[in-house]
Image (cartoon, grey):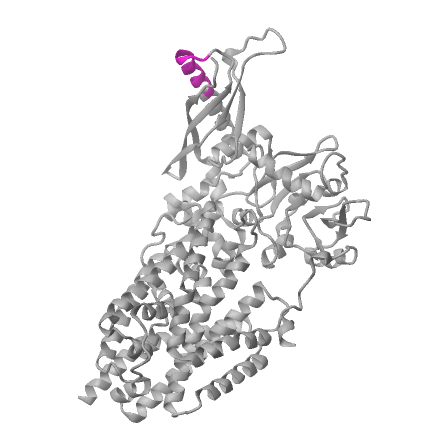
Amino acid sequence: MNGKINISILQFILMIFGVQIGIGMLALPRELANKSGTSSWIAIIFGGIICTIISITFIKIREKAPTKSFVDFFTFYLGKILGKIIVFLFSIYFLYMGYTVIVRTILYIQSYILQQTSVTIVLLIFLVPTFQLVSGGVHLIAKYIETIFPIIVFVLLMLLFTLKDMNIYFILPIIKDGWLPIFKTIPTTTMSFLGIEVIFIIYPYLKEKEKAIKGVIIANAMSTFTYLFVTLICFVVYSPYEISRIYEPVIDILSVLEFQYVERLDFVLLSLFLLVISKTWVTYLWVGMCGITELFKLKSYVFVLFILFVVFVLMTYILIPTFSTTNIWINYITITGICIIIGMPIILWIGGLIKK
Amino acid sequence: MIGVTGCRDKVNIEDITMSLLLGLDVNEEGQVEMYMSSPVFSEEAKEKNEHFEVKTYSMKEARNFFDTMATGITSGGKVQAILVGSKVIEHKNWYSTLDFLYRDPKLRLNADLVFVNGSVSDVFDLELKDKPRSSIFLPQLIQTAEFRDVAVRTSLRKYYQMYYEKGITPFAPELSIVENNLKMTGTTLLNDQNLYSKTLSMKETQLFKILNDKVEGQLSLTLALEKFKKDVDIFKENAVSFYVKDIRRKIHKKYKHGQYQFNINLKMPIVINESPIKLNDQTEKSLDVEIEKKIEKDLNDLVSSFQEAKVDPLGLGIFASAFNHSVWKKNDEKWISFYEKANIKVNVEIIIFDKGISM
């Protein structure tokens, strides 16, 4: 299907990388430090390796039916009814994930930049460009992600300036309390690599399919590097006793940057970083919408999207999301996500066996 | 309507009272007092500085009171320094009053924390005829003192780290009023309970900075060497002055039978500015040895005075944690009791790499 809409291998890599890097990065150093102290950065490498293996499995499974669309692929493996149920649950998961990320982002904006503005209003403003991107399809989203990729490089480079206050002794010795706590942290780090499940959906659009495995390896390596970079910088700048007291070390660390004419760089960089986070929710919402429209054979895609956004606004208005409630949502979602990325290949494999 | 709602917390710059200095003190009756000072940009006002004083326990509440008196809306985004009175740091839990500074993202965590030797109200009331307005002068004073390395600089962020890190005890610069003038007089050291413990003089502060390997500006040290003493008149001609360049510090750590041992080796390149003797290749050696001896003695005295006062501003605990983590982890609450008994030695190696243009 969709012979005309294609994305290049670079866009494929950046899309996976873009979905992985997002809201989770801001608090990651604290979460890791809480789990197993400053040695926990080693677990990121293991998490990265695990996710690379899972991604390669995804590609291998997807290669069996490379051009089949989202719904067709699952019905091909699992039969009509079961396949459709799975796609439906999958879509709900993606939409909910997208919604959670956008709400969480708005909470950050409210906490750091616009303290007096209500969440609903900011959500409305954010949904306008989201609407344009999501209704533009994979081509537009891929281009958008490609365009804003330099921002994450810029934000990461700015982090290097904070190293003037570093103390290398904060992370020494490298393995503080043995290997066991590090292994226990691997699930947490694996969660931060969530996003690889979109491979299932964007794979058919990839132009050079033979390079797909190389692509996922590069994407996962990029994410691993980014997480390692950020975490290590936070661990040498903050004392091990201090880091567990700061909610978002990655934003907070930037607040001390001051140049001759620019102060409070954290606000500027947080605003830029919002674009980086937006990649996550835009992709998730698009993927979710893909499933829903294909499943119910809906013709007016734009209208459904509009209805969905109205539901989002109403939900936000009624629920009044806070940091604690979104924490609970994120918790549920990441557990579901882990189940999906591990369970999906197994289900498909069994489905394939039965089919034979 | 939607478009303008984002601007609800918009404040025009003319309507802002920029609090550049904040103060915290305890008065004679034991009440907590908060101070704020901000520049006034009005041509009609005679005073170019407005300052307020409020008795309250919470700085955030104090801001409401400030707003009842100030020309504009008080904003903390440009805070330059927080002055804390010397009485405050004799009371427990004083640090909790500063909690809001770390919670509000709009506040500037680069603001300097300064301890005032005396009462904060004296600093705010002080009228300096030959200086710019105090809310601008004071930050400049801190900056110049730091450049000459006669004072340390502790930002709020840095203090937060020293407070929560168990391997270091906090310190911050000290400000005094000497003969109607503001003066940076040294460094206040606090113990692990975050209470006042000891004050370092200006000279000790310089040595402390050397020991801490935190020389960033221009550190010029003057020593009186006994060996070259002539004692004929009031000019004794035995002073040697030098700039200290990039210090290389190496700390050797050992742990044996419950006792830590730290050997702090400093390699110190210096530039001689002033010398009591004629310097050629032979005499240079003797001067080198004398400086080495003197500075080594001073530094060792300083370290043992730290141990006596039970303060660890050098953060040796961080080194202890880095090299012997299993022991550290069991005893991180009791670090100071280990530190007291530790065997700390400072070795200095002086390298004279410039002696000036005349012998």
Q: Which quadrant of the structure image shows residue A74?
A: bottom left
The reply, left or right, for residue A228 in relation to residue A256 is left
Residue B285: in magenta span: yes
Q: Nearer the viewer, residue B272 or A333?
A: B272
Q: Which residues are magenta?
A: B279-291
**Image quadrant occupied by the N terminus of chain B:** bottom right
Indicate whether A317 appears above or below B249. below
The reply to whether residue A148 is in sight is: yes
Q: Position of residue B346 (x, y in %)?
A: 43, 29
Q: Is residue B114 left or right of residue A356?
A: right
What is the count of numbered marks?
0
**Residue under the image location 56 percent in, 77 percent down:** A124
Residue A169 picture quarter: top left
- Direction left: furthest residue: A356
Q: Position of residue A325 (x, y in %)?
A: 52, 74
A149 sits left or right of A46 in the view:
right
Q: Is residue A215 magenta?
A: no
